[in-house]
Image (spheres, rainbow, N blue to C red):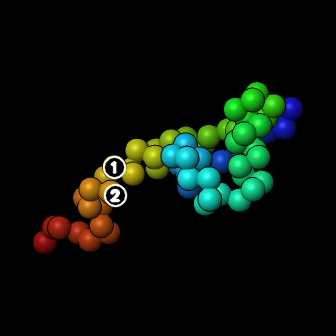
Amino acid sequence: MSAYVTDTHPLLWYAAGERSKPSQKVLQIFEAAESEQALVYVPAVVVWETTLVPVVASGLLTGHSTSG
């Protein structure tokens, strides 16, 4: 069985059904993982980054400091 490591964007795109954004190879890997023919490891930092999506989408994280 093949094993792969994902990054944040491909994982989020695939989970959201955005099939036009990832490459065909990435789609094949995730589809193989869904059918238990491959493993896709999700690093801890990717899990953490996915928690930031609602914060970024709400505009709370803009890269600008609000202090002083």
Residue farthest right in this picture: 1
Residue farthest left in this picture: 68
Hey, what amino acid is under mark 1? Pro
Q: Which residue is mark 1?
A: 54
Q: Quadrant of the N terminus?
A: top right
Between 59 and 21, the one nearer to me in the picture: 21
- 44 relative to 26, above or below: above
The alpha-carbon separation of the residues under discs 2 and 1 comes to 6 Å
Residue farthest top in this picture: 36
Residue 39 seen anywhere in this rendered image of the structure: no
Identify the residue shown where x is 59% and y is 47%: 14
Q: Which mark is residue 56?
A: 2
Residue 10 placed where, x, y %? 61, 53
Identify the residue shown where x is 67% and y is 38%: 41
Identify the residue shown where x is 75% and y is 44%: 29
Secondary structure, mark 1, is helix
Q: Quadrant of residue 43?
A: top right
Identify the residue shown where x is 77% and y is 37%: 32
Q: Which mark is residue 65?
A: none
- Image check: 59 left or right of 34? left
Residue 9 placed where, x, y %? 56, 55
Hey, what amino acid is under mark 2? Val
Q: Quadrant of the C terminus?
A: bottom left
